[in-house]
Image (cartoon, coloured by chain):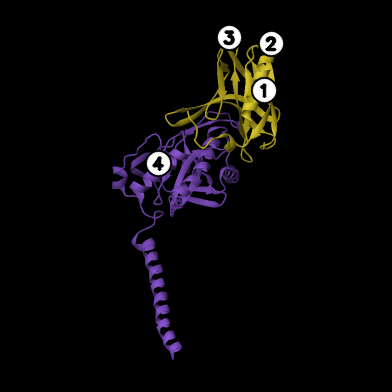
Amino acid sequence: MKRVVKKSSGWVAAFVLSMGSAVAAPVVTGAWIPEQPPGAMASAVFLTMKNTSDTSEALVRAAAPGFKEVQLHRSIEENGMHKMIEQKEIVVPAHGETRLAPGGYHIMLIEPTETIKAGMTVPVTLYFADGSHETLTVPVKKRSSMMPEGGMKH
Amino acid sequence: MRIVRHSFWQRPTRGLAVVWAVAMVLLTGMLAGCGQPSVNEAPVSSARLAAYHSPDLLVLRPMSPPITVPTADFVAQSGALHTPTMFQGRWTLFYVGYSFCPDICPTELTALAQLMPLLKKALPAVQWQVVFLSVDPERDNPKRLAEYAHYFDPAFIGMTGSRAAIDSVTGALKAGYRISPHAPGDVTYEIDHDTGYRLISPDGKMVALLPSPHDPAAMTQALVQFFKEVVQ
């Protein structure tokens, strides 16, 4: 599934490049939202952004209908303490990639108007520093299906 | 005549067999119940805990001397719960967090849900319980917490309590947390919090810390070793 998504995104990248477009927005792959317990007030969007251009790019804002607020965040761990820090932007270095993944960067979805369940999709719009934006149809998946039993590697 | 002799010999044999079986059952019961307290009841030996060298401190850190969980009152959907009596008769993995947490708490509770079947298989005599203590009673009521915890595993206990009760237990167990400053009425504030799982013995003592990142297979191996050398 993941590979298919990546492949198709690769085609999108090739298409954009072949167009000779000036848009240097990162190529986004593998986006998913973990299903949250009933009544949960917050969820997250995880994805990978790849920058094929010579200049660094940044995700500066995200929006999703059906949520009171959408923020950019980073989970960090210091001395056994978990902290969540709101981010002004999430940088994608030139010819590099940035992963939004459990235990790290994420797009935080706050106060859903209805419980989001696995199998649903959420339209998420990403706004980049170069002024471009992209709307993704992001699937909601069970967290356990995306977390191998080998655990998180920090 | 033959039949009579036959029955004469058989009866006492049967009787003896019954007596023997009953004696064995009683003996087994005594060994399990009285002579040797079960793994789910025995207090942990401080000496064995002090002597234990964990093969990987990044997975399991023994707590020597152990920390006694203070007396405090909490509330879950099932009703009132009290430390340390709620730890009796089982082994507990204790985790602090809050349900508004979008990333780390669900990740850690998913890892705990993956760990439980591995532990039940590797240590079948041990009774386990997972307790998720919310340090956010302003937003987390017992019903919400139960829904949240049961989503990961229906056996998980979600509880919270007064600020004083929370601070008494988290303070003693050195499970720090910090609520971000927020305006009254703001319901989107964040809480920094400790990410370790705390292992609590049936006599209500924290005997080990399992720090993150939490790898279910590595934790199972570490706990099997710990039980072998410290508990059983």
**What is the letter of the yellow chain?**
A
Q: Quadrant of the N terminus of chain B?
A: bottom left
Rounded to the nearest angstrom, the CA distance separating label 2 from label 3 is 18 Å
Q: Amino acid at mark 2?
A: Ser
Label 3: state its secondary structure.
loop
Residue located beneath label 3 in the image: A55
Q: Earlier in the sequence, mark 2 or mark 3?
A: 2
Q: Amino acid at mark 3?
A: Thr
Residue located beneath label 2 in the image: A18
Badge 2 sits on which subunit? Answer: A
**What is the letter of the purple chain?**
B
The residue closer to the viewer here, A6 or A33, is A6
Asked if labels 2 and 4 touch by Cβ distance under 8 angstroms, the answer is no
- How many discs appear? 4
Residue located beneath label 4 in the image: B222
In the rendered structure, the answer to whether residue B30 lies left or right of residue A24 reads left
Rounded to the nearest angstrom, the CA distance separating label 1 from label 2 is 15 Å
Camera-side mark, 3 or 1? 1
Q: Amino acid at mark 4?
A: Ala
